[in-house]
Amino acid sequence: MDLAFLHPLYEQPGPWASVYVDTSRHAEDTPQEVRVTAQAVVRELREQGADDATCRAVEEAIGELAHSPDPHGRAVFARGGEVVLDPVLAHSPPGNRAVWAPLPRVAPLLDLAGEDPLAIVSYIDRRGADFELRSALGRRRAGAVVGRQHPVHRTSSADWPERRFQLKVENTWEHNAAEIADALAVCQDETRADLLILVGDERERREVRRRLPKRLHERVVESAHGTGSRLLDDEVEQVRARHARQRVEAELDRFRAARAPDGQGRAGAVEGVPALVAAAREHRLEELLIRPDGPDAHREVWIGEDPDQLAVRRTELRVLGEQHSWPARADDALLRCAVVTDATALSLAPVPAGTGDETLAGGLGALLRRQ
């Protein structure tokens, strides 16, 4: 997950209100439900010590969700009477929750807003194609291709004039397939889509796939299910979920390989809080890996005002010259370091734990930048 959008959260000091709201239930009494939710969240924040101005800002932000089109939910991060960031969630949170803490509670975003594969579904026929973008937030049109319209149908005759006609049909199909492939490649380049799902007859899918640039071939999935089919919708979601799992599995393989020391005895990956804290202080995090249910994720560490002022014990910060320090969750503290050093992060939740693989049993690890 690219963490660049979180930068505003680390440009100002805490404490912070972090709120996750489920907006997946839409009913006639939604405005009343939202008011009740806002009041409950504010009550919870006040009990944790949040100031009145920040509570009012959060309550107003949640109140505006009464008629929200968000299909799953919204996160709200606020401090000093101002909402600083309110990203839309790609998945519904497990209930509404509110946290008042020295750092923003951003770790849940890895599951709720990250690793949402974007797919272009291309509905192909002999005359052209319609493109549609699919993500957890829904679908939207992404353009269309209108190829040559005549001739597009074969005949069964073997007469010479008909054979010439069939040759023209073949040429029309090939021309249209090339135009569709070109447009699909441009659409992928503009949207950075992870997947290209081709829908249509087998021959039409094959012709388009054959003309796509080789760099896109591994992103292509073909489907014989028709436009608007419930089976197609289910298949698209299965393809997207499978892609997310494969991405995590690939990063875990990369992590396992990087743990082995190189010729100079240096490993390219570490796990466990002490090793991660040391790497974060040295700005060596390349990609942070988090298993949300791991015991290390909620382990307490100590932070200073600057992101690289991070320690396992409070006394370590004093040795480093930091006069002010606060306790924080390890995952949120490490994510702050990752954000400000332009590292990425990945939740391992798509790959279930407990399968006999003890990789990242504690829940935290990282691939490191080479020195």
Image (tube, rainbow, N blue to C red):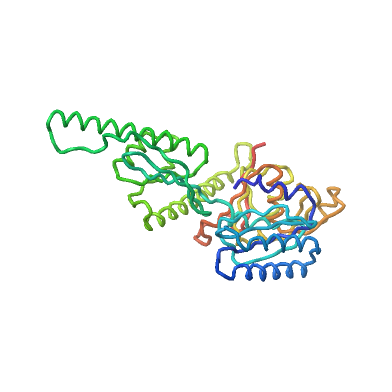
Task: Tell me residue 137's x, y (percent).
Answer: 53, 54
The answer to whether 76 is drawn above or below residue 170 in the figure is below
Q: Give the residue displayed 66% in from the left and 66% down from the top.
A: 97
Task: Tell me residue 79's x, y (percent).
Answer: 77, 56
Task: Tell me residue 158's x, y (percent).
Answer: 12, 33
User: Is 225 left or right of 31, judged from the image as shown?
Assistant: left
User: Is 43 left or right of 343, judged from the image as shown?
Assistant: right
- View extreme (left): residue: 159
Which residue is nearer to you in this view: 227 or 278?
227
The answer to whether 104 is drawn above or below residue 282 in the figure is below
**Quadrant assignment, res 50:** bottom right
Which residue is nearer to you in this view: 227 or 297?
227
Q: Give the residue displayed 38% in from the left and 58% down from the top.
A: 230
The answer to whether 300 is drawn above or below residue 247 in the figure is below
Task: Tell me residue 84's x, y (percent).
Answer: 73, 52
Count every numbered label the image shows and give the total: 0
Q: Give the position of the C terminus as an image quadrant.
A: top right
**Quadrant assignment, res 43:** bottom right
User: Is 233 left or right of 359, judged from the image as shown?
Assistant: left
Q: Give the residue displayed 57% in from the left and 44% down from the top.
A: 258
**Quadrant assignment, res 164:** top left
User: Is 160 left or right of 356, judged from the image as shown?
Assistant: left
Which residue is nearer to you in this view: 100 or 200?
200
